Image (tube, rainbow, N blue to C red):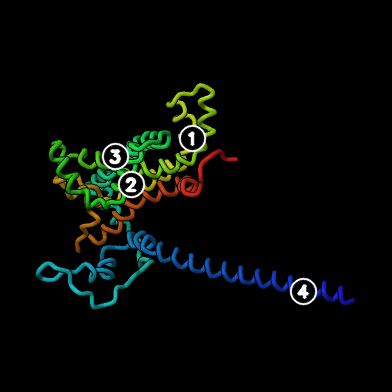
Amino acid sequence: MSVQKSTKGRSARRAHHISLKKLKNAVFMTLATGICLFFAILFLTPIVLTITNSFMAASEISANYGSVFATTASGGRQFVAERVNLKFIPDMVSFSQYITVLFKSPEYLLKFWNSVFLVVPIMIFQLLIAALAAYGFARYDGKIRGVIFFAYIILMLMPYQVTLVPNYLVSEKLQILDTYWAIWLPGIFSPFSVYLITKYMNRIPTSLIEAAQMDGAGEWKIFTGVCMPLCKGIIFSTGILVFIDYWNMVEQPLILLSDPERYPLSVYLSKINAGEISLAFAVATIYMIPTLLVFLYGEEYLVEGITYQGGVKA
């Protein structure tokens, strides 16, 4: 009898311990979900506010946010003493801003295509050069390789503002200042993609490469047939990050381009004045579309490139 009571007591304590553990896990998951939901709403609020406000009439936008962009008699910003009215739902839906941006003011579309013309070549050629360089770093060892890769890391850690003056001087010497090449060349040879793809290629099992070599594959065949298919996730992930980074660039065009007609749309968005508040919401919404499409299309690859550790998938 005592043995049975002891066994029942242990079973009851074990069941109580399991139920308590489940309760703690449930409370933790609830709190974690609540925190994630709070930050998700916090981060998405500006995007939702921009999109909904782009369908407001100019008079309604000026009434809600005019005090934010008001200036003093000397041209400076004035202190906002009154509360700004943040509205998510317009009183009356209006497409006048989009009609102005798309049909009546072609300069905005011109700046949009300037952004595309600047960013797409940088993304494509940076990934191409980075993949080739990463293969060299991953396949070969040595002191020279270590020194060069360390230099890549140092350059990557430097903010772009530090290298902006040297880029300006080099562009001036090469006589490419005030041309797209002044922005393309530093972007194409950026060390950021080389670092990410190299660290990923280093995780590829050497047994795969040795098996390809035993089958008679050369370096180019190993690169295109073994490494590139396995690195598809990290290449897409890096491409998304590079696109978003250069799509939002402001300093480079302002310093390296003197012709405002060549400026991308990101420069316009950084120079919003009081007379263009209503158009700014519509232009910002159009400006967000490529970034959102790239992210939504490559979300799976982005997650895979960050979490996948290399090797052969089951």
Residue 62 x %, y %? 25, 67
Image quarter of residue 197: top left
- Is residue 181 in view from this perspective? yes
Q: Residue 229's mark?
A: 1
Label ID, residue 12 = 4
Name the residue type under label 4: Ala
Q: Which residue is mark 3?
A: 189
Closer to viewer: mark 2 or mark 4: 2
| Residue at screen point 60% across, 40% down | 314
- Cα gap from disc 3 to disc 1, whole angstroms: 23 Å
| Mark before the other along the chain sequence, 2 or 3 | 2
In the image, what residue type sits under mark 2? Answer: Ile
In this rendering, the answer to whether 67 lies above or below 216 is below
| Residue labelled with disc 2 | 153
Question: Mark 3 and mark 4: span between their CA atoms?
Answer: 66 Å
The number of callouts visible is: 4
Task: Nearest to the eye among marks 2 and 1: give it.
Answer: 2
Give yes or no for contact between labels 4 and 1 (Cβ–Cβ under 8 Å). no
